[in-house]
Amino acid sequence: MTVNPRFYPLLATIAIFVLAYTVCWIQFPAMLSTRVVGNLLTDNAYLGIVAVGMTVVILSGGIDLSVGSVIAFSGVFIAVVLRETSLHPLAVFVLLLAVTTAFGALMGLIIHSLAMPAFIVTLAGMFLARGAAYMLTIDSVPISDPFYDFIKSSYYLMPGKGRLTVIAGVMLLTVLVGALVAHRTRFGASMFALGGGEQTARLMGVRIGRLTVLIYAFSGFMAGLSGIVFSIYTGSGYPLATVGTELTAIAAVVIGGTILTGGAGYVVGTLFGVLTMGLIQTYIVFDGTLSSWWTKIVIGLLLLLFIVLQKGLLRISSAGQSVRHA
Amino acid sequence: MFRSLSRIAPQLITLGAIVLLVTAFFPDFILIGYERERLVGPIIDVLKRGAPVALLAIGMTLVIATRGIDLSVGTVMAISGAIGAWAISSGLGLAPTLALAIGAGLLCGLWNGCLVAVIGIQPIVATLILMTSGRGIAQLITEGRILTFSDPSFAFFGSGTLFGMPFPAVLWVLLALVVTLLMRRTALGILVEAIGVNRSASALAGVNARVLLIAVYMAAGLCAAFAGIVATADIRGADANNTGLWLELDAILAVVIGGNSLLGGRFSIAASVIGAMIIQTIDTGILLAGFPSEYNLVIKAGLVLIILVVQSPNLAQSWRFVKDESRRRRERSYEARKELRS
């Protein structure tokens, strides 16, 4: 049985995650417990959700630098609205998701209608969302709500006393939905086509304008959802939170095997990218003697490894194709 | 001369408009005084504080002209600053300290350039690697602390005065002049633009694209090293966590406000540094005009969006369309009148 070369980056990601986990397990046998796995999923839930949105944007050949600021805005928005009004948190969530989705759609509209690079438009969006968060408040606002306490205290007890929290479950569900949307719907197919090349996508009959708006709206929705999860995780809203998360999310997408030029990759790979990055942090915590800056250096090395790996695979597969053509 | 002036005219007009706007809120903005043998005033302050972004924008312009982007310059600032502070505080003397700090910047540029030109990684990803890991390296050098020093000769690069002007301001103006002359008085500028327009075509035309690309990224590293030295000398300490944080985004913004296309090709360094001054005037102006500092980012985002919309290629196209259409209509009515007369 031969494996399609398209799966190589995904398989490499999963293999490296398994390998890294094995190394951790040999050194610290306690790492192999559902408690550690549960914490790994909970601690990285917000990153996983936002990375799903980022994967879709990157697969379409774009980039969204605004997500970190949108997460911070979401936290502040929820905290301030809950403090000032007596709305139920669920109603606030719906309101927030509408705001962030509209924000993403607006950025998509500007990118398409003004033919500006996504990089610059979402950069302006990043300033705008962060600024909007500052305008709501410049302090850290605690959230005290019975509904929040309820969500925080409810979990599914896995065998081995590991806790699968609600937010970890939301993250896994998001990855599932993201994978279905990207690989099983017409929207996903058009998005891959756009990532492959705008000209070809247009010739295929994809409505580029509508698609661009939808893609950035999707990313905005995911950033809003991630903001909700982050506010549950930290129990507060703080306008200076999650600075630089957009770059962490991009790194997770790349480690997950998605090619940054767009057109090739898997949403599931991104989950493993996020978990690999979380694993490095967990290892450093377990070790106790390493300084936190090693996290950054190791993540940089992993990025390099994956990109060189992808380059190599691309060369091999294109060489194979040219042999077949000859 | 006239043509190059008309190239930077939109940026100059924008800068003038923003200066006027700030002056309307804060009339003392344009006052320049002379105290203790140096110029003082808000505008001099803008020239000095804008130095790191202006320095970064010079290198970034060249990188963007080759259709690349360099996300790592802020981190390279931190690395150079950390090495400079470490060298000067361990008693190496000024010349070796500068050599080490600049060498670190060049080395970072070489690394980026090799990833882009030799291995062929997309610039945005290649430089993302150094951006994430570089801050870890800088923290490794400072061992997680803020390295402070008191050497006055190194501090001169941040707070010294030359010809009555703050040294950082003199530095960026000089560097911009030197690089512009180097690019425009030799064929180098055209070769850089050729790579940006079409790399394979320029290679076929005999341009050594690989070497030139590496050189361009090294130039960006050099500029980042200068910016790092200025930022570190200014506060007499190296803060690996915060030196140059997010300045790469400001530098890219400066280049874009300078009217340079992110898709490479023609570039103007003068327009980019004016772009950097526009950003700094906005930042300083918002503070001086007395707006609450919470509004800074929103106002900045709004102004940036307006500038971008005005420069949008689509808008220029539709503007040209309207102009052509009205001319055609005028000609048609003119001909109709002529026919009526005859």
Image (spheres, coloured by chain):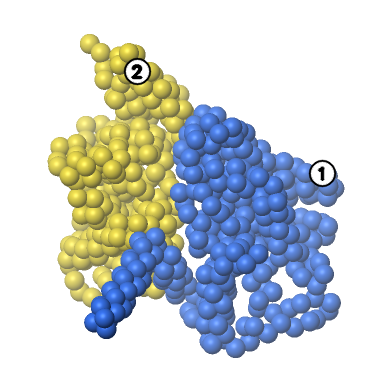
Chain colours: A yellow, B blue
Q: Chain of mark 2?
A: A
SS at circle 1: helix
Horizontal side, residue A202 vs residue A297: left or right: left
Picture layout, residue B16 above or below residue A263 = below
Residue A77 appears in view: yes
**Left or right for A61, reference B200:** left
In this figure, which residue is indicated by the disc labeled 2? A322
Q: Which residue is mark 1?
A: B96
Question: Label 1 amino acid?
Answer: Pro
Sort mark 1 into few (<14), some (14-19) or many (20+) by Cα contacts within 10 Å. some
B224 or B69, which is in the foreground?
B69
Which residue corresponds to the image point at 73% horizontal and 50% vertical from the top-left?
B85
Q: Percent from the top left, x then y, of residue A317?
A: 35, 20
Q: Is residue A285 above or below residue B6?
A: above
Q: Which residue occupies the extreme front position in the image?
A: B342
Question: Closest to the observer: A252 or B146?
Answer: A252
Q: Position of residue A272 (x, y in %)?
A: 33, 34
- Residue at far top of view: A1
Tell me the amino acid under the disc marked 2.
Ser
- The mark lying in front, picked from 2 and 1, is 2
Q: Quadrant of residue B24?
A: bottom right
Q: Where is residue A311 shown, x and y percent of the image?
A: 43, 27
**Which residue does the image show at 37% across and 39% down from the upper left?**
A261
Q: Quadrant of the C terminus of chain B?
A: bottom left
Instruction: Tell me the chain of label 1.
Output: B
**Is label 2 in a helix, a strand or a loop?**
helix
